[in-house]
Image (cartoon, rainbow, N blue to C red):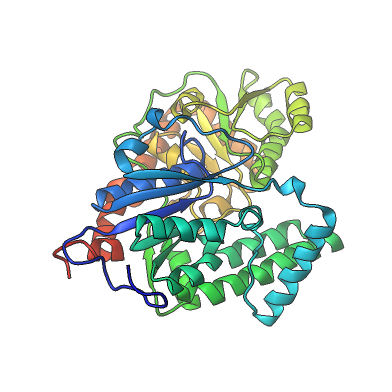
Amino acid sequence: MANAGTAPNSAPSGRKPRVLTVLPDFPFPANTGLHLRHASLLELIHRLGCYSALLYFTTEEREPPSLGTTPLARICDEVCHGGRRFRHSDFSTASLVLHKAGFLLRGLLGLPGKRYPFSMSYDRIGAAAIVLAEARRVQADFVVLPGFMLHYAAELRANGFRVIADAIDVLSELSARLLACYGNNLFSGLGLYSNHVACEAQERIYLPKCSEVWATSSQEAETLSRIAPDINVLVVPNCLDEFAFQPGHPASNPTVGFIGTYSSFPNLQAARFLAEMFPAVLREHPRARLKLAGAGLPSEEEKRFRSLGYVDILGAVAQSEDFYEQCCVVALPVFVRGGVPLKLVESLAREKPVVACSETVAGLDVRDGHDVLVREGVEDFAQAVSLLLADDSLRLRLARNGRDTFMRNWSLSRAESTMQLSSLLAQSQPGKN
């Protein structure tokens, strides 16, 4: 390991680079977008020939399965649990107000901080010190951090570790979209504005402390390059193993599906939108069903959806493949997104016809009428869903074109090729310097 305050240029000669990947949650079962992203990154690091150590935290919603039931024994050399994050609901009102005030003041002044909007629950348990201690223990050459933990990069760098930021979101842009969509009263608006200015400062201060940043799309890579022009910014898309995520059998029943974690408000908003628009679908297809899969649905919302009579609440599913097998059409009205939504990627990989809103596909290499249908508003969205339920040939054409688009943009093999050419991890392999 390099001396404190320096950053090594590569792993010691003849030794494969040692990589510590920090994850905010246990990556398996990989049924949500975030967990699919994390599982794919661990697979990519393994394929690059690195020594791979994993440090994961746990959340209040999930209890991780035993390691032996997951692929971690194959793709990771060692695995360590960092602790359970602090439950957001356990922050007192007074502490939340103080945090928001601190976010606003430090953000406006451009001052560094120890807590930031999307990392508070991890900052509260001392995750920065836990990450540093584990990096020392495994003698890491590189530490891969989630983008919202960017502020841990300064101390890691000062202790001789090279930091790679996995920017699944451009935090400044995500917080701006949240402000625009949900800051419609004084209290929520001020809180979301505080988050936004803090995220802007977080990226501006700490991205330059990294050696490399992984963006999910070329559009986001350009934004990150403007913020930190002197570091290596690489597009590592939200990708899936094309051999594991295969097309299934077309569903015969008129079933429309959505999957997500409903503690994320954009996913809850999508479920509400679909429940509102579905009566228009029923006018054309009286036997149609709306299936909502995923954990975290508030009990009051679940009760209301069940009372509608046309909604099936599936809860958390053990295998996403089982859910997609039930879907004739996948509906994705996600109006605020960060990065490339893996629920879209998986739908395309499994050859499922998709109706999405423009925000879901913005900046992505998909075309309305070719591999997805893009619609806005309740009536237009319902008409597109009804059209797909009625037209077998259109469903088949969109599904097959979608699979081709997935292979071109979001297959694991494509991401591996990109990293082999451009990532510092590949360049640090023995014999490449």
Q: Position of residue 99 (x, y in %)?
A: 75, 64
Q: Residue at x 28, y 52 (%)?
A: 51
Going 63% across and 48% down the picture, which residue do you hit? 376
Question: Viewed as shown, does residue 413 lie left or right of 258?
Answer: left
Residue most extreme to the bottom: 109
Instruction: Tell me what residue is drawn at x 62 percent, y 47 percent.
Output: 85
Image position of 328 with respect to 199: above or below? above
The C terminus: image quadrant = bottom left
Q: Is residue 100 visible?
A: yes
The residue lying at 65 percent from left, 47 percent from top is: 266
- When the figure is inspected, residue 331 is found, relative to residue 128, above or below; the finding is above
Instruction: Between residue 33 and residue 219, name the one nearer to us.
Output: 33
Q: What is the tally of numbered marks visible in this picture?
A: 0
396 or 34, which is in the foreground?
Answer: 34
Q: Is residue 203 left or right of residue 274?
A: left
Taking the view exactly as shown, the residue that stands out farthest to the left is 431
Q: Is 147 or 327 nearer to us in this picture?
A: 147
Instruction: Tell me the quarter of the image containing the N terminus.
Output: bottom left
From the viewer's side, name the closer residue of 376 and 169: 169
- Residue 155 pos. (x, y %): 50, 70
Q: Position of residue 342 (x, y in %)?
A: 47, 45
Q: Is residue 79 left or right of residue 183?
A: left
Residue 371 can be seen, yes or no = no
Residue 39, x across and y down, in percent: 41, 43
